[in-house]
Amino acid sequence: MQQPIGTKTASRKNGVLLFRKEAPFAAKPSGALPAPAPEAAKDPAWPSPDSGKSPDRASGKQQPAPRARVSKSAAKSAPAASEAPARATRAASPASAKAARTAAIKRVYAGRQKQTQRKRRQRAGGAAGARGTSRQALGPAIRRKLPAAAEAPIAKPPMAPIAPAAAAFPQRAPQPQPAAAGEPLVSVIIPVMNERRTIGRVIDEARRVHPNTEVIVVANGSTDGSADIARRKGVRVLAFAEPLGHDVGRAVGAKAARGGALLFIDGDMIIAAAQLKPFVQSVLRGEADVALNDYSGPTNKAVVHSVVLAKYALNALLGRPDLQGTSMTAVPHAVSRRALEAIGADALAVPPLAHAKAVRLGFAVKAVKHINVGKLNLLRKQRERTNPLERLIVGDHLEAIDWLARQTDDRGGYGDTERKREFAR
Amino acid sequence: MSIRRNAASARRPGRSGYGGSLQFEYAAGFADASALLRSGPAPAGPDAKLRMNEHWTRRCLRGARTRRGEHAQLRGRAYADGFAAGLHLPKGAWLPVALTKSAAAVVLAGSRTRLEAVQQLLRLPLQEIVVVLEDGGEEAFTRLRSLPEITIVHTRERLGADVGRTVGARMTDAELILFADGETPVPAERLAGLLEEVQAGSDLALADVGGQLGAFRGWDDAARIRAFMNWSLGRPELHANSVAVLPHAWTRQGMERVGLAQLAVPAMAQRAAIGLQLRIRCLPMHAARKGGALNGNAGGTATATTGARLSAGDHIEALRAAMRENGARLALPDQVRRRFAAEGGGT
């Protein structure tokens, strides 16, 4: 059940081009296609969008990728071929030489056309607008990374059967973490929401972090086919029809992860595997339970961003001013299984809370390597201007302080016995 | 060129030592004092200072000139000198502040108290100066006793950080209360600014420490925590300024709404002041670097680390107090997360 790439807006010319390139695949018996299994079959433990809420999703299809991708991605990724004819039929009508081939495919996929048209009508009003600019701006980047995307299905690793994240790792940091038989050593968790432009390359880099790595993509509220790109890469995809909210994907991914070291990265930020390795390595070697990005944000000014302020303040309140502005709020960071089990996977949904728990429960929390995510994050910053996350994140820090106080006393464990309050009454 | 023009147009400094428009102020002060002498017996000691300030205040109100700012202070000094000369008292001591309300100062002192800190306060038109001397020892006590016109509260044991603030505040019934540190002298001109601010209608006037802190990377932890609390409570423009920092000034009304007992835990007082929506103003103490450093921790008696720990505890306590009223996230709710998904609920 794959995506008709470019069904929405592809021009006639594009349609023809698309059809011509798809033809060799389409001409084969459909069974020969490496058509991906429906998601539910792949990962029954997780709800699939097929159980969908919106009419859009009832068909089990992702939204089509925009035109910019069509020319190359459709040509090279086999599953995309399945949906192409819907477009191709119309496109082929003037080019009578191709009519015969068109008709053959038309028979096979006739049923799909109706659905596609319905979807097209539904989408007519929306989309495109907000993302249009950045898509164009990133056009070259997309094209550059496509060959890699196309090769991926070939290099696809066999999918390991899903086991519950159990006590597969009796060894605990700070000992090095060996892999149990058949279990991955490293889990890379990538929450994704409409990050089609980058997700493919992010997955490629994530795979290279360690030879024994599982990559878990938590696609939530993605309507741009991000999940499909991930699935085509052969990684585990936990798909949710609706957005789970900021950072909840991390918690969901962590629950499903089986590795001894969990690396958290973002789907919209391409960081080279070489840069990611130190985080994983320091956890695997037992040097740290929580390996943080040594990035504190811009602080060479009198008034800093509220999130930077909150991170510094939380670390100071936790008695770890040496951590400066580093935090589990920022990616990339790696967490050992031992730490994960103690702080609880659900706490990862509120990263400052997880951070406070990790520090307070005595785990080795260290800033391992500096990656300037502020620089890599420019595009997202722009998005935040309309949908500010700062209030959410500062609120998270307050929640962490609340937890801290509830663990100890109203003063967070900082007594003031020296203060003779009776004189002040 | 300019010198010649000044010499031609403005009055040269005469015996008063003041030239230009300040000479008028001096003369006015002298005339007011002479009139006072003619009408009755000469006031003495602190009374003379307060009478002078009364006349200065009246003059300011009548004249409707700028009553605040640096030039106003210069004119005030000229007037005060003239007034002192009229009463045959030594010049150069007083700094008048146009106040229609009574003012007092509470000085938090320890064994390392410096007399200059109190001497600067003596220049101001304060009804009363209460020095809370905690565990100061005989030597510090004797030194302070040498100063006239002050009330000393001497305790043998330490009251602990900032409890002296409450104790001192209870000792006075003035309408404006200035809290100052006994170990860090701050020039009277800057303290006068705080008094002017609360006189002008603010409930709480804070010293703006922004200039001293500089870039964020150089801030101390206590300052970061203070700034974070202000931000969380919805007053980001206060930056790292807080009642935890001395000096600052309260109105009695504001102080009583917050509760005198709260003053013992500065962060609690700060939270209450923000929560009660008191009018808080920060006074840019741009010249503060020239004088003594403003003191960030309680009474200046605690060492840096214990001060930081105390400050951290105070702010957690204050945030917790706010959380009890408004929930753990205060006014920053989380409306986007589907946390049940993280807890295993799925979609």
Image (cartoon, rainbow, N blue to C red):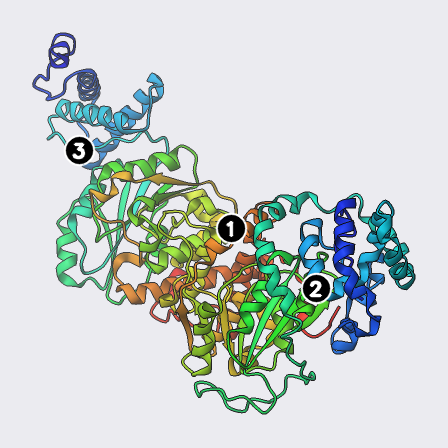
Horizontal and vertical percent position of residue B55: 27, 24
Count the labels in the image.
3
* Residue corresponding to mark 2: A77
* Residue corresponding to mark 1: A378
* Position of residue B314 in the picture relative to residue B137 (left or right): right
Q: Mark 1 and mark 3 in contact (Cβ < 8 Å)?
A: no
Q: Chain of mark 2?
A: A
Look at label 3 and name its amino acid: Ala
Residue B91 got which mark? none
* Position of residue A287 in the picture relative to residue A187 (left or right): left
Q: Which type of secondary structure does the marked residue at label 2 adopt?
A: loop
Seen from the viewer's position, the closer of residues A195 and A95 is A95
Would residue A390 be seen by someone viewing this image from the given angle? yes
Question: Please, is residue B342 above or below residue B247 in the view?
Answer: below
**Among numbered discs 1 and 2, the one appearing first in the sequence:** 2
Farthest-out residue, left? B15
* Residue corresponding to mark 3: B44
Look at label 1 and name its amino acid: Leu
Question: Please, is residue A215 above or below residue A167 in the view?
Answer: above
Mark 1 crowdedness (10 Å alpha carbons): few <14, some 14-19, many ≥20: few
Q: Which type of secondary structure does the marked residue at label 1 adopt?
A: helix
Q: Which of labels 3 and 1 is toward the front?
A: 1
Q: CA distance from mark 3 to mark 1?
A: 69 Å
Q: Which type of secondary structure does the marked residue at label 3 adopt?
A: loop
Seen from the viewer's position, the closer of residues B265 and B320 is B320
Q: Chain of mark 1?
A: A
Q: Which of labels 2 and 3 is toward the front?
A: 2
Q: Which of labels 1 and 2 is toward the front?
A: 2
Farthest-out residue, front? A97
Mark 2 crowdedness (10 Å alpha carbons): few <14, some 14-19, many ≥20: many
